[in-house]
Image: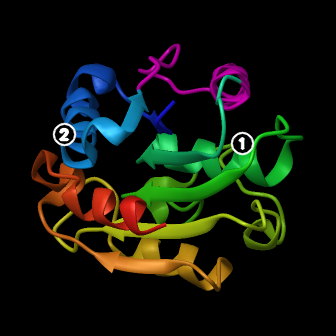
């Protein structure tokens, strides 16, 4: 069994199809030693934490060994919320990669009822997991400043300034490089 990566899509109408290119890029860059699983999240047009957390839980529970979790945009936010406040399946998480992830209350565009993270969430993430933050300064969907907010609350996170807007030009080779170095 190769190494497993679970990729959680972003939110919005059509997000699964749009982010499929990111998942494919990651799989191609990682090669055959890795299996990238890309589950479709329910109600993607109006992402709901309660609905998505069950799917994330099942994906982590299905890991055959150590896993790496990757979340894009709202999928990254829901992934962080899940791993910092829910009991996780008894599976080792080696890494968490957050790509263009909105920070709750990071600006007026990203303030919604229920859109929050637990107090001290950065210290509640899996202790052995390496955390990576990726964001492009030219992201027109999630402001670049949100990455710094996550970095402030996750002191050991490795921060990567990328290029290519919100979708990183559908090129996750920088993420794959970090995964392969874990």
Question: Which comes before the other along the chain, label 2 or label 1?
Answer: 2
Left or right, 70 with respect to 56, comes to left
> Magenta span covers which residues?
38-61
Q: Where is residue 27 in the image (x, y as percent from the top left)?
A: 27, 37
**Residue 10 versus residue 153 in the image, above or below:** above
- The answer to whether residue 140 is visible is no
Q: Looking at the image, which residue sits at the far front? A: 1
Question: Residue 60 colored magenta?
Answer: yes
Q: Where is residue 97 in the image (x, y as percent from the top left)?
A: 47, 58
Q: Position of residue 22 (x, y in %)?
A: 24, 39
User: Residue 119 or 173: which is nearer the viewer?
Assistant: 173
Left or right, 174 with respect to 49, comes to left
Residue at the location (65% across, 47% down)? Answer: 115
Left or right, 11 with respect to 91, comes to left
Left or right, 4 with respect to 54, comes to left
Question: Residue 46 colored magenta?
Answer: yes
* Mark 2 element type: helix
**Residue 98 versus residue 132 in the image, above or below:** above
Which residue is denoted by mark 2 in the rendering? 28
Which residue is denoted by mark 1 in the rendering? 114
Q: Looking at the rendering, which quadrant does residue 117 occupy?
A: bottom right
**Residue 165 versus residue 112 in the image, above or below:** below
Say which of marks 2 and 1 sits in front. Answer: 2
Q: Looking at the rendering, which quadrant does residue 16 occupy?
A: top left
Q: Where is residue 2 in the image (x, y as percent from the top left)?
A: 46, 36
């Amino acid at each position: 069994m190769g190494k497993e990566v679970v990729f959680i899509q972003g939110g919005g109408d059509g997000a699964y199809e749009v982010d499929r290119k990111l998942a494919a890029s990651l799989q191609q860059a990682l090669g055959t030693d890795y299996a990238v699983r890309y589950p479709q999240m329910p109600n993607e047009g109006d992402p709901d934490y309660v609905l998505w957390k069950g799917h994330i839980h099942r994906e982590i529970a299905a890991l055959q060994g150590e896993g790496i979790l990757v979340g894009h945009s709202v999928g990254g936010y829901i992934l962080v919320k899940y791993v910092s406040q829910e009991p996780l399946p008894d599976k080792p998480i080696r890494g968490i990669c957050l790509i263009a992830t909105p920070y709750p209350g990071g600006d007026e565009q990203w303030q919604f009822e229920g859109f929050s993270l637990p107090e001290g969430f950065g210290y509640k993430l899996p202790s052995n997991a390496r955390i990576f933050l990726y964001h492009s300064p030219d992201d027109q969907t999630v402001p670049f400043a949100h990455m710094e907010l996550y970095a402030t609350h996750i002191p050991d996170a490795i921060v990567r300034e990328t290029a290519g807007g919100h979708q990183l030009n559908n090129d996750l080779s920088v993420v794959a490089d970090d995964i392969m170095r874990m």
